[in-house]
Image (spheres, rainbow, N blue to C red):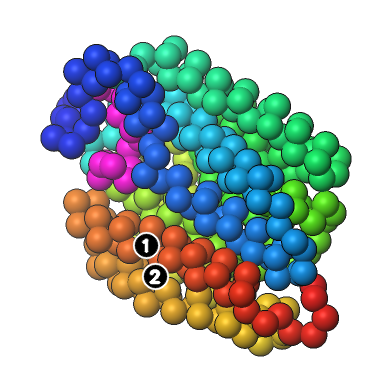
């Protein structure tokens, strides 16, 4: 059965407004997770006693968002080439099933691929300039982040198809935190990794729960995501475990005086994560019923990132500055 278009999905008429079409193809509503990852990294540097360089901070945030936008577009490109998005008839737009720009005739596959790689190309000179302003180690962080984003769906790695998508996302967003910290600090530190892990795991949870509505389409296209491999009944418990590890890590690090006591406030978002998990437990086999769980998971991650960044930036760090 061919996929039917949701009324909110982009329509071919959008081609008449090319700049708007190109912007919307990047899925800007979902770039917030990168903004908050950058803020966490800037907050750990500030909490360490580093005087923030505002122009470098602004440039870091902007080009991290450009990189995320390019990765979003390339994910659509490679999912179209694999047939995963075309086979997805149970998607919950705009959360799952891609942007639908290719499937609905707004952009061709070739145009989408060119846009994605052009956006990533824009990041390179900015990254090199920031490296000159900080230290050569930033190149390693940047390359790691770009590789993880590209290899998420691109062959031959296609990490998400190997059941490694969640790990790639967690590692990718942790590199964003580390990179934002490094630009300011000018050296490697364990602090942004310790501080950012709970957030990175909650971002991975967004990907994980999005795989439930996409399961049948992914399986038909040979995209062996973690939900396809485990099945909905096992995967829902794995997702709950991932969320519990995220919050347990934060509480443990606060309890062991690795983070400010105030950072524990970010654990309040557990309420939203548990509400999402409860919905998933009841409807893991019913994609049409999962929209509340998807929204709550996104809310939990973004609010967690905001609270964490604020408390790390302005909280009282234990002992000497990290």
Residue 69 lies, in percent from the top left, at 49, 35
- Residue labelled with disc 1: 299
| Mark number displayed over residue 120 | none
Report helix, strand or loop for mark 1. helix
Question: Is residue 101 rendered magenta in the image?
Answer: yes
Q: Nearer the viewer, residue 4 or 2?
A: 4
Q: Nearer the viewer, residue 186 or 293?
A: 186
Quadrant location of the C terminus? bottom right
CA gap, disc 2 and disc 1: 8 Å
Residue 73 lies, in percent from the top left, at 45, 29
Is residue 254 positioned above or below 302 on the image? below
In the image, which residues are magenta?
91-104
Judged by depth in the image, the label closer to the viewer, 2 or 1, is: 1
Quadrant location of the N terminus? top left
* Residue 248 seen in the figure: no
Question: Is residue 299 rendered magenta in the image?
Answer: no
Mark 2 or mark 1: name the one nearer the start of the chain.
2
- Which class describes the residues within 10 Å of circle 2: few (<14), some (14-19), or many (20+)? many
Query: In the image, 2: left or right of 134?
Result: left
* Residue 134 falls in image quadrant: top right
* Residue 138 falls in image quadrant: top right
User: Residue at 60% across / 46% down in the picture?
Assistant: 58
Query: In the image, 75: left or right of 286?
Result: right
User: Residue at 58% across / 82% down in the picture?
Assistant: 262
Residue 239 lies, in percent from the top left, at 45, 63
Most common secondary structure along the magenta stretch: loop
User: Residue at 54% across / 35% down in the picture?
Assistant: 66
Report helix, strand or loop for mark 2. helix
* Residue 50 seen in the figure: yes
| Mark number displayed over residue 273 | 2
């Amino acid at each position: 059965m061919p996929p039917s278009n949701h009324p909110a999905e982009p329509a071919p008429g959008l081609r008449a407004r090319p700049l708007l079409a190109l912007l919307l193809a990047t899925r800007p509503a979902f770039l917030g997770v990168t903004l908050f990852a950058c803020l966490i990294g800037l907050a750990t540097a500030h909490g360490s006693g580093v005087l923030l360089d505002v122009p470098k901070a602004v440039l870091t945030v902007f080009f991290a968002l450009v990189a995320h936008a390019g990765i979003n577009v390339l994910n659509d490109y490679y999912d179209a080439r694999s047939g995963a998005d075309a086979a997805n008839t149970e998607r919950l737009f705009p959360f799952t099933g891609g942007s639908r720009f290719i499937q609905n005739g707004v952009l061709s596959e070739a145009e989408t691929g060119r846009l994605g790689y052009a956006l990533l190309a824009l990041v390179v000179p900015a990254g090199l300039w920031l490296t000159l302003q900080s230290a050569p180690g930033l190149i390693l962080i940047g390359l790691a982040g770009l590789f993880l984003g590209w290899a998420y769906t691109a062959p031959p790695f296609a990490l998400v198809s190997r059941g490694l998508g969640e790990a790639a996302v967690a590692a990718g967003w942790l590199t964003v935190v580390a990179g934002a910290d490094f630009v300011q600090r000018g050296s490697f530190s364990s602090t942004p990794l310790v501080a950012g892990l709970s957030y990175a795991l909650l971002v991975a949870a967004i990907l994980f729960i999005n795989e439930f509505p996409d399961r049948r389409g992914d399986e038909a296209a040979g995209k062996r995501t973690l939900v396809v491999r485990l099945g909905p009944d096992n995967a829902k418990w794995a997702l709950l475990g991932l969320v519990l590890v995220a919050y347990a890590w934060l509480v443990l690090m606060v309890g062991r005086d690795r983070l400010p006591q105030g950072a524990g406030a970010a654990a309040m978002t557990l309420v939203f994560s548990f509400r999402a998990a409860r919905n998933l437990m009841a409807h893991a086999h019913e994609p049409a019923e999962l929209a509340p769980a998807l929204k709550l998971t996104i809310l939990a991650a973004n609010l967690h990132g905001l609270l964490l960044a604020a408390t790390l930036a302005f909280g009282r760090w234990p002992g000497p500055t990290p």
